[in-house]
């Protein structure tokens, strides 16, 4: 709304203060280029504001694009309208807006790059540098069990030890029964995020099945793997989650176990599953 109002005010100011140039004096290519630039910058401003969460980066990117759009629009108007000498300051707004837009957009891009670097590190924990989005769990956006088995098989062929840890969000089933599938899914998603925040770049976290998440820790001995597994379990158990319909926060109960990765990948995963719960569960988080 503010941007649209600024366009109207700028156009009205030019229309009231300036005189139209003869059509013969119009530079058509310049006019089309500047008007197109204004439309493009305005369109990108709308896209940025609509597709990103609010915050400093979004404000700088959107504000910079809006200022560039206004500057280009003022330049386009200057192609068909002649301002009197007394209103020269109005024409100078083009340069001021252009400079402000470049500075704001530049600052926004620097912060955006930093933001993308952080997100890239998180994606590295999810994907280990490989992006096969056909094998991503739709709920948690983590890699699925098939991708996990492939990575475990690759690690088993290397000379250095690799630990795999399995975590069971035991509260998820109770939450699903009491609060519904959406609340249980939220708990699982938050647990996955907590794991991602505590992983090394070379680690991999996957959704194995139901309410179970698995972390693959390359170049990690059994003792170190146990220490890291205990740490990750404590981090998830320390979470307090608010869900719709409950005024108080839910405490998460987490079970964990770990083992060294062996050549029998499925056998290792099955043993971890039995260690967590020897009785097969019939209900799982959707």
Image (cartoon, rainbow, N blue to C red):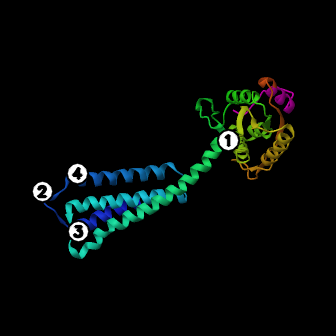
**Which residues lie in the magenta part?**
268-286
Q: Quadrant where the C terminus lies?
A: top right
Of labels 2 and 3, the one closer to you: 2
Cα distance between the residues tagged 4 and 2: 13 Å
Cα distance between the residues tagged 2 and 3: 22 Å
Residue indicated by mark 1: 125
Cα distance between the residues tagged 4 and 1: 50 Å
Which mark sits nearer the N-terminus, 1 or 3? 3
Location of residue 170 by image quarter: top right
* Helix, strand or loop under label 3: helix
* Residue drawn at the location 58% of the way across and 52% of the way down: 115
Furthest-bottom residue in this view? 86
User: Mark 1 touching mark 2, by CB under 8 A?
Assistant: no
* Helix, strand or loop under label 1: helix
Q: Is residue 221 left or right of residue 4?
A: right
User: Mark 2 touching mark 3, by CB under 8 A?
Assistant: no
Q: Which mark is residue 29?
A: 4
* Helix, strand or loop under label 2: helix
Which mark sits nearer the N-terminus, 4 or 1? 4
* Residue drawn at the location 73% of the way across and 41% of the way down: 179
User: Mark 4 touching mark 2, by CB under 8 A?
Assistant: no
Q: Is residue 272 left or right of residue 71?
A: right
Q: Is residue 222 left or right of residue 242?
A: right
In the image shown, does 234 or 157 lie closer to the viewer?
157
Residue indicated by mark 2: 24
């Amino acid at each position: 709304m503010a941007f649209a109002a600024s366009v109207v005010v700028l156009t009205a100011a030019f229309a009231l203060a300036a005189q139209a140039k003869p059509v013969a004096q119009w530079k058509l290519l310049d006019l089309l280029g500047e008007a197109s630039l204004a439309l493009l910058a305005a369109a990108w401003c709308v896209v940025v504001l609509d597709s990103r969460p609010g915050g400093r980066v979004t404000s700088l990117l959107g504000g910079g694009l809006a200022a560039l759009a206004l500057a280009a629009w003022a330049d386009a108007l200057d192609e068909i309208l002649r301002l009197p000498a007394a209103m020269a300051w109005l024409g100078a707004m083009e340069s001021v807006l252009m400079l402000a837009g470049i500075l704001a957009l530049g600052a926004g891009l620097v912060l955006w790059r930093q933001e993308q670097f952080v997100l890239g590190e998180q994606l590295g924990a999810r994907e280990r540098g490989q992006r096969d989005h056909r094998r991503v769990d739709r709920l948690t956006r983590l890699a699925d069990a098939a991708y996990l088995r492939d990575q475990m098989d690759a690690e088993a062929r290397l000379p250095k030890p690799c630990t795999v840890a399995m975590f069971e969000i035991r509260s998820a089933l109770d939450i699903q029964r009491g609060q519904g599938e959406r609340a249980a899914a939220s708990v699982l998603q938050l647990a996955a995020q907590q794991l991602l925040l505590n992983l090394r770049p070379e680690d991999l976290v996957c959704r194995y099945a139901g309410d179970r998440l698995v972390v693959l820790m390359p170049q990690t001995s059994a003792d170190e793997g146990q220490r890291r597994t205990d740490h990750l379990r404590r981090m998830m158990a320390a979470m307090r989650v608010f869900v719709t319909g409950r005024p108080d926060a839910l405490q998460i109960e987490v079970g964990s176990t770990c083992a060294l990765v062996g050549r029998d990948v499925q056998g290792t995963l099955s043993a971890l599953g039995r260690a967590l719960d020897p009785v097969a569960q019939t209900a799982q988080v959707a």
